[in-house]
Image (cartoon, helix red, strand yellow):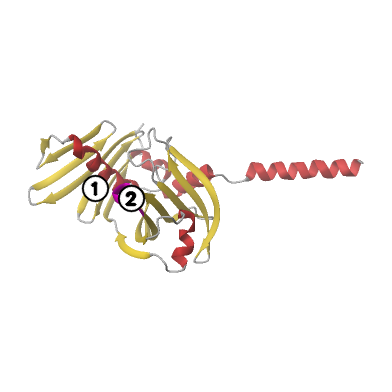
Amino acid sequence: MNKFLFFLVGLIFISFTTIKTQITADDIINRAIKVAGGERFDTATIHFTFRGKEYRSVRNNGYYQLERKVTGDNGVFHDIVTNKGLSRSINNCPMIVADSLITRISDGVNSVHYFANLPYGLNAIAVNKEFVGKSNIKGTSYYKIKITFDKEGGGTDYEDEFMYWIHTEKYTVDYLAYKYAVNGGGIRFREAYNPRVVNGIRFVDYNNYKENDLSVSLSKLDHSFEENRLKLLSKIVLENIYVYVDEDCC
């Protein structure tokens, strides 16, 4: 009987230890953010160029200012999105933005900065994280994390769904996919390439693929990618990256 009790106690201890050490979606995302730059994002000023447009973000522990400058026939359009809302100027002259354009302009600015700074932002309050499992892409093991958003605080595209493939050892985001509803909806799968670190913050470019079948689960797109069933639409390339981090900011 004593041997049986000893065995039972040992089994319970092993089971408890396994449960305690099992990695969670929060653990994986937090490690991925740390690898990408961690707390440096919180006080960083980041400049880059994307498809001929200039982008700049300024963060100060909760405060954010996201900018986009576009040079056109009518001059330089400068859009700024902050915690307080949107402002626009043309050739440094403030403009009144029609209510019907505020969301479209703000979302356009937000979207580029969001993808450029991933995985930063995935631990926000309105973000829901779910560990889906593991998979292999090109012989490499990845954690699969599903991301959804709460309606409150999740932005105008809160119904969008994302999937991230995070390296099980390096904790880098090497692939991602998302399903969106606007303009009839669509599915995209992105393959990261050209990783580089600028002043402690990691950036990547992407091969941007399309899935035509909107009924396909995002979690299955890794198989579609390996079987060459996705169509390459474009490349997402960030140029002229500059990063300043105020490490003394409080």
> Does the magenta portion include 106?
no
Residue 55 - label: 1
Overall secondary structure of the magenta section: helix
Residue at (11%, 42%) from the top-left corner?
Answer: 90
Q: Quadrant of the C terminus?
A: top left
Residue 113 position, x and y percent, is 30, 46
Residue at (49%, 66%) from the top-left corner?
Answer: 138
Q: Are marks 2 and 1 in contact (CB under 8 Å)?
A: yes
Q: For residue 175, which quarter of the picture?
A: bottom left
- Residue type at mark 1 is Tyr
Residue 7 position, x and y percent, is 84, 45
Q: Quadrant of the N terminus?
A: top right
Task: Single out the residue that lies furthest toward the left.
Answer: 74
Q: Residues within 10 Å of mark 2 (few under 14, many from 20)?
A: many
Task: Single out the residue that lies furthest toward the bottom.
Answer: 228
Q: Can residue 214 be seen here?
A: yes
Q: Which residue is mark 2?
A: 116
- Residue type at mark 2 is Ala
Q: Can residue 34 be seen here?
A: no
Q: Which residues are magenta?
A: 182-186
Residue 206 position, x and y percent, is 35, 59
Residue at (41%, 54%) from the top-left corner?
Answer: 177
Residue 246 - label: none
